[in-house]
Amino acid sequence: MESGANGDSIEKLQGLQITPLDDDDEEEREMVAYEYEDDDEDDGEDEEEQEPVTLGFLEKPKNRWSLLRHLFPSKAGGPPAWLDPINLPTGRSCLCDMCGEPLQFVLQVYAPIIEKESTFHRTLFLFMCPSMACLRRDQHEQWKRPPEKASRSVKVFRCQLPRSNPYYSSEPPKCNGTDKPSGPGVSLCNWCGTWKGDKVCSSCRRAHYCQQKHQVTHWRSGHKVECQKLNLSSPSSDSNLADAGTTSDDTVH
Ligand SMILES: [Zn+2]
Ligand SMILES: [Zn+2]
Ligand SMILES: [Zn+2]
């Protein structure tokens, strides 16, 4: 494993984190402005005339639980609150098409269309590669490629659920801190907290990872010690540390 590259990408990830704003000064608020982008081909000509649209701004959450998935949050930074907690994006769709590194969560917007049964719950998730080089390449290369061959370093996923679904009550949440989801989600990566952790630490078999790179990073940043403790606290498991630092591809149920 290229340790230099790993350290480098952690720094980039940390640089990307969106920290909550401590004061309520209107001017200090970080504006989140996006150019409204329409996918329709025929709107292409007036693209240059479009004014930037401010979709919202960041505010500190009133309660930490208000960002949990069963409260259907719109949020920026931290791990995503996946709407469908089981059917997460997998494989290549979680990676930057330029460098192959896992994409970093940027923000999510809860945007239900309640007129339609299938979109009673609907959330859009925005991810991007933390590497500036990839973002520049993405910007420069997109116009050259046909849309079906596009390779992106920024991706948006849409997830929608009907009102009656296995994950949440069909009644609105009480929003008093007592709400619970109807069932657990899949295990997420212990390092990035973002993608499905379908690889497990072969030593403790409790830590989950989306890919080996994140397992190695987690190991170096403290799991090495934690893993040993986990092994000591459960004598039945194999505590042979020679195996540590590897993952196996099986899912723990
Ligand atoms: Zn990239
Ligand atoms: Zn991960
Ligand atoms: Zn472990």
Image: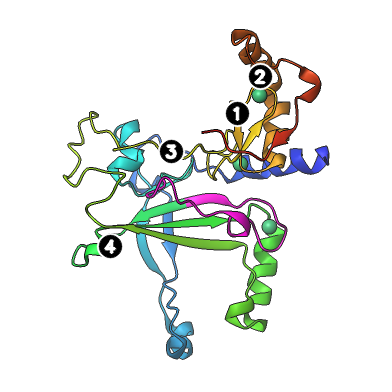
Residue visible at 47% across and 83% down?
Answer: 47
Please, what secondary structure does the residue beneath circle 1 have?
loop
Q: Which residue is mark 4?
A: 119
Q: In this view of the protein, which residue sits in the foreground, 43 or 157?
A: 157
Q: Amino acid at mark 1?
A: Ala
| Separation of residues labelled 2 and 3 (CA atoms) | 31 Å
Please, what secondary structure does the residue beneath circle 4 have?
helix
Quadrant assignment for ligand 3: top right
The answer to whether 109 appears left or right of 113 in the picture is right
Q: Which residue is mark 3?
A: 20
Would you say the residues marked 2 and 1 are in contact, meaning their CB atoms lie under 8 Å apart?
yes
Give the residues drawn in magenta, as a range. Answer: 82-106
Would you say the residues marked 4 and 1 are in contact, meaning their CB atoms lie under 8 Å apart?
no
Sequence-first disc among 2 and 1? 1
The image's colour scheme reads rainbow
Sequence-first disc among 4 and 2? 4
Check if residue 86 falls in the magenta segment.
Answer: yes
Residue 19 in the image: state x and y as whole percent: 48, 39
Indicate if the residue with disc 2 has its beta carbon within 8 Å of ligand 3. Answer: yes
Q: Which residue is mark 2?
A: 227
| Separation of residues labelled 4 and 2 (CA atoms) | 42 Å
